Amino acid sequence: MPNLCVIILNYFSPNNTEVCVNSLVDQEFDTLYLIDNSADAHQAQCINTLADKIRVQDIKFKIVVLISKENLGFGSGINTALKHDYHQTGGHKLYLLLNNDTILPSNTIKVLLEEKQKKPEIALLSPKIEWGGHDISYYGYIDLLGHVTSYPKKFAEPYVSGCCLLVGSELIDSEHNLFDDAFFMYGEDIYLNWKAKQQGKQIYCTDKVTIFHEGSGSSNHGGLFYEYHVARGHVLLGLKVNRPLYKKIAYILGRVFYLFMRGCLRSIRYRSVIPLLAYFMAWFPINVRSSKLFS
């Protein structure tokens, strides 16, 4: 049995979570963490019921359910599971992070482990992703502006998505955190890619397996929750990535212009001032933690 732990977050989408978990039933790993981030009693009951339903099947892994009293966001939710895992088991060598709206072919974990074994220098390993009718390997990030592309282009730094990501434990810090808690959602995987490269580690996407990703399953495009956190993630990436001061100033100014234009265009598209409002809010740490309140 591989020394591998799988972590899945649920946020008001137990049906997606169940489909995702069912795609793991025949795969080999030793522990599955299901984290409910909904801060809702009914959702917690759904996740516990799902765990009980899976446990009675002929599975080889242990299921641990963690119920959060508040929506921690993606990065902090993962960090919570990592801390719990360390204190309960001493930690794992490898972690597979999954969005709950992903579906994995039955050979996914086997392929990822084989690739990792062949190339131990890889710290972040992703499969190809089928999303929106396209197969995506590496995304690209134009850091000067704060813009994501579905594939690397000129001036776009390649990165692997956090929606299905095999992570080596060497990236986990002494406090058992993988992600920077400042990122609530969106941008945390780009920052993790950057940190891995700074440490001399490699990132890699294998074309030997392709998973399905629904995408934005818990977010309402045009709503304040989504618009704020996307813009906030780009702002944080401009502020946090270490670079010479003159570059940092240029990259912040690039975001001032580009994210403003993005907010204007999305406000026109959705016939709402919310995307533009979110742009101004994104420069400040504001507690926008529920898509149910800010939709």
Image (cartoon, rainbow, N blue to C red):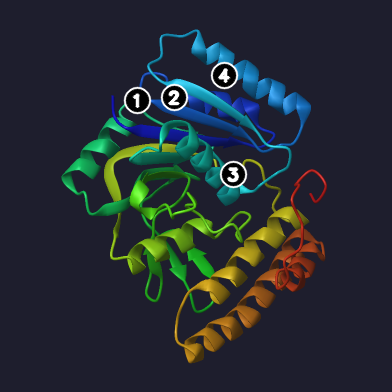
Q: What residue type is labelled 3?
A: Gly
**Which residue is the site of mark 1?**
106
Is residue 55 shown above or below 245? above
Q: Which residue is drawn at 28% across and 65% down?
A: 200
Residue 77, labelled with which disc?
3
Q: How far apart are marks 4 and 3 (CA)?
A: 18 Å
Is residue 5 shown above or below 218? above
- How far from the left and from the top, in percent, is residue 281? 76, 69
- How far from the left and from the top, in percent, is residue 211? 40, 37
Q: Is the C-beta separation of discs 2 and 1 under 8 Å? A: yes
**Badge 1 element:** loop
Q: What residue type is labelled 2?
A: Ser
Q: Is the C-beta separation of discs 2 and 3 under 8 Å? A: no
Q: Distance between the residues labelled 2 and 3?
A: 22 Å
**Which residue is the site of mark 2?**
23
Residue 51, labelled with which disc?
4
Q: How crowded is mark 4: few (under 14 residues within 10 Å), some or many (20 or more)?
A: many
Q: How crowded is mark 3: few (under 14 residues within 10 Å), some or many (20 or more)?
A: many
Q: Which residue is drawn at 46% across and 9% down?
A: 57
Marks 2 and 3, the one that precedes in the sequence = 2
Q: What residue type is labelled 4?
A: Ala
**Badge 2 element:** loop
